Image (spheres, helix red, strand yellow):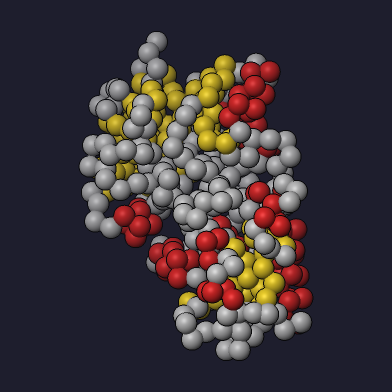
C-alpha cells in the first residue's frame, strides 16, 4: 500500500488529495494545524484551518484565501478524506487526520495532552501512522501540574508586589501568554502586556475566549503608574529598554526548557516556571500509545533519541526532517509556545 503522506522539500504532502500540511514553502493548497508562524506561513494559494485558528491566521498573515472547518467534520479533497481534531496546543490547534483507501495517517502538528483551561483538550485519533513532534522528547522533561503552577506564579507575583517590585514574566504571544493569564489572580495587582501579546489577546477575546483585564504597556506606563504589576513580555523583549522601565523588578521565564539545569541563568531570569504548550515525555508516550499506530514519524526535537526509544518499544519509528521550530529557547521569533 502506498504511503498516504510523503515528505518533500516543501512540506508534508498528500498525493491522493494534492495538498500539503503545514508547508514551509509556497504551495497551492495548504492545510494548517495552528497559527504559530512556523506552521502557518505566508505565500500559499489556498488555506484550510479550523474556525478557531482562522482569526489568528488572518491577524498574522493579512489578506489570504482561507476556508475553515469544524473539529470532526469530514472533508473530501481529491481521493483523500480529511478531518481536524483538537491538539490541545493553543486555541484552535488541530491534528489532521488523512484517510486514503482505508489507510489512516495523522499529523499532530504541535500538541499537549494535559488540559490547560484555555485550549480545546487533546483528543487521541486512531490511525495506522502518526507524525509526532518530540520537542521535549527526553525523560527529564515533566511539566509542573496546573494547580501547583498557578500557586507558584501567584505567590511569586504577590511576594514581589509586597516588596515593591514589578513582576516581569516572559511568554510567547500566542498560547503561552493567554494560558498564564488564565492562571493568575488579578486581585494581586494590575496586569500589563507587551503589544504583541495584547494584540493576540484582542483576537482571542473577539472569539469569545475569556481572559482577565489587561493593559497594553504603552510608553507612558511604568512602575510608578502601575506599582506591583505583573508584566507579560515576549521573550525577545526581556532584558531590553522596554522592560527596564519597570524596575526594580523580578524577571521570570515560563518554558519547558526551565527543566534543564542552568537555563534560567542563560535567560538572565530570577525565576523559571516549568510549563509548555508542547507535550512532555509522558505526554508524548501516552499520545502515541492512544493512537494505536504502529508507524511513528518523529519531527523537530530530540528526534534521534526519541526514535531509538520508540524502536525499543516495538514501533516502526522513523525520523523526518522538517522546518518547524518547536519551543526554541533562543529563537527571537515569537513563533511558538
Name the quadrant of the N terminus. Answer: top left
Closest to the observer, 222 or 310: 222
Q: Residue at x 49, y 43 (%)?
A: 325
Residue 293 sits in quarter:
top right
In the image, residue 184 sits, relative to residue 332, either above or below, namely below
Residue nearest the observer in this picture, 291 or 266: 266
The vertical placement of 96 against 56, above or below, is: above
Image side of residue 296 versus residue 45, left or right? right
Does the image show residue 324? yes
**Residue 327 location, x and y as percent?**
55, 47
Question: In the rendered image, is residue 283 in sight?
Answer: no
For image coordinates 71% across by 57% down, the residue present is: 265
Number of marks in the image? 0
| Residue in front for this viewpoint, 134 or 178 | 134
Residue 275 percent coordinates (x, y): 66, 53
**Residue 147 appears in which quarter of the rendering?**
bottom right
Q: Where does the image place residue 105, in percent across and percent down from the top left?
A: 45, 25
Q: Residue at x 58, y 29 (%)?
A: 303
Instruction: Give me the residue at 28% from left, 39% from top.
Output: 26
Q: Position of residue 46 (x, y in %)?
A: 24, 42
Q: Quadrant of residue 39?
A: top left
Q: Is residue 86 above or below residue 152?
A: above
Q: Is residue 182 above or below residue 2?
A: below
Amino acid at each position: 500500500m502506498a504511503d498516504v503522506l510523503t515528505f518533500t522539500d516543501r512540506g508534508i504532502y498528500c498525493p491522493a488529495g494534492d495538498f500539503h500540511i503545514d508547508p514551509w514553502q509556497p504551495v497551492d493548497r495548504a492545510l494548517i494545524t495552528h497559527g504559530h508562524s512556523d506552521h502557518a506561513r505566508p505565500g500559499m494559494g489556498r488555506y484550510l484551518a479550523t474556525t478557531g485558528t482562522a482569526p489568528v491566521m488572518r491577524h498574522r498573515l493579512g489578506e489570504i484565501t482561507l476556508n475553515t472547518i469544524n473539529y470532526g467534520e469530514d472533508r473530501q479533497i481529491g481521493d483523500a478524506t480529511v478531518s481536524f481534531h483538537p491538539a490541545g496546543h493553543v486555541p484552535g490547534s488541530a491534528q489532521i487526520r488523512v484517510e486514503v483507501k482505508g489507510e489512516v495517517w495523522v499529523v499532530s502538528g504541535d500538541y499537549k495532552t494535559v488540559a490547560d483551561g484555555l485550549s480545546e483538550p487533546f483528543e487521541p485519533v486512531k490511525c495506522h501512522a502518526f507524525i509526532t513532534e518530540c520537542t521535549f522528547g527526553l525523560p527529564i522533561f515533566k511539566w509542573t501540574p496546573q494547580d501547583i503552577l498557578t500557586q507558584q506564579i501567584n505567590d511569586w507575583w504577590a511576594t514581589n508586589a509586597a516588596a515593591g517590585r514589578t513582576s516581569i514574566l516572559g511568554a510567547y504571544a500566542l498560547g503561552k501568554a493567554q494560558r498564564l493569564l488564565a492562571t493568575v489572580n488579578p486581585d494581586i495587582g494590575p496586569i500589563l502586556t507587551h503589544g504583541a501579546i495584547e494584540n493576540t489577546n484582542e483576537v482571542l477575546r473577539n472569539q469569545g475566549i475569556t481572559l482577565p483585564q489587561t493593559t497594553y504597556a504603552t510608553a507612558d506606563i511604568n512602575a510608578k503608574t502601575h506599582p506591583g504589576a505583573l508584566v507579560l513580555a515576549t521573550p525577545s523583549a526581556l532584558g531590553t529598554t522596554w522592560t527596564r522601565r519597570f524596575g526594580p523588578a523580578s524577571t521570570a521565564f515560563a518554558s519547558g526548557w526551565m527543566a534543564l539545569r542552568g537555563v534560567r541563568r542563560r535567560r538572565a531570569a530570577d525565576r523559571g516556571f516549568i510549563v509548555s504548550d508542547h507535550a512532555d515525555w509522558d505526554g508524548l508516550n501516552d499520545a502515541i500509545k492512544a493512537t494505536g499506530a504502529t508507524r511513528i514519524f518523529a519531527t523537530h526535537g530530540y528526534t534521534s533519541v526519541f526514535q531509538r526509544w520508540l524502536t525499543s518499544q516495538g514501533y516502526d519509528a522513523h525520523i523526518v526532517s522538517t522546518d518547524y521550530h518547536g519551543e526554541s529557547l533562543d529563537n527571537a521569533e515569537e513563533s511558538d509556545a
